[in-house]
Image (cartoon, rainbow, N blue to C red):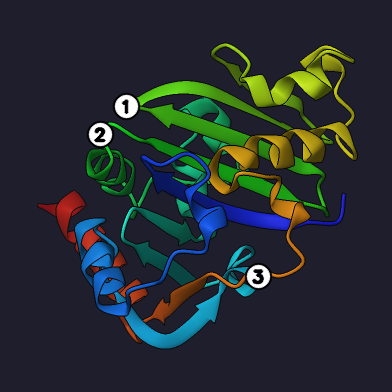
Amino acid sequence: MGWKAFAVFATAVPGYFGTRPRHETQRAEQLRLRLGLSGYEYVGPATLDAALYPRKGALYIGAYPDGAIVCETQLACQLFEAASRRRIGGGDAPFAEFKPALLGLYPDGEVLALVLHSVVNLWGYSLYAAGKLRRSAAGASDDGIIANEGEPLAEERRVLDACAIEEVDEEVGGEELVFDVSARMFGQRLDAFEEFHLELSEYRRAPGSIASFFKKMLGKQNG
């Protein structure tokens, strides 16, 4: 496993992001606010190849006529159920608004979270259709299978016809499953593209935003 990715894709058009839609910077800013992602400041344009594995404190938002991409480590984890989310590494605060807000933007579409991390052989995907969880699967070298909910997708069959998900090899099979499932959003596997020309907006934590968040949380606890 050599890839790293923490990304969420949302659209009502199958394979939409493979058409390389045009990013709208102003719309990305509006989307950031609608998703409850306060405390960030705009840095500049970025491309998906840089955004897929966001560095600490970075947020990437792609806003297109018929879809959206959000790349941030904890945000991708929010699309997994609570028990598996904690094992993957995503906490609840300060992103409680993100999941319902994003699902509400595409009530008739699909929202797909993908996670990959080569160091711990982490892999996973969580798909929502029409606002409901349809399929969630994830695994890691130390924990084995940490999510397995819903009926397998057609895109999973190539791997799962060869072995049960409990027997998937984390270093090969898990990554293969993630890439096969990514075809729902790109029309082909994500790793089939030589370059990711999709543009996004890059944001970073505004100075003082983390301290302000914890002060707010302490105020609620003491109130």
Whether tag 2 and tag 1 are in contact, CB under 8 A, the answer is yes
Label 2, on which residue? Answer: 107
User: In the image, 62: left or right of 24?
Assistant: right
**Residue at left offset 53%, top offset 22%:** 135
User: In the image, 21: left or right of 7?
Assistant: left
Give the mark, 3 or 1, whose residue is nearer the N terminus: 3
Label 3, on which residue? Answer: 49
Residues 29 and 204: in front is 29
User: In the image, 133: left or right of 187?
Assistant: left
Secondary structure type for disc 1: loop
Residue 216, image x and y in percent? 20, 63
**Residue at left offset 77%, top offset 54%:** 192
Give the mark, 2 or 1, whose residue is nearer the N terminus: 2
- Tell me which amino acid carries mark 1: Ala
| Disc ID at residue 130 | 1
Q: Quick check: 67 above or below 212?
A: above
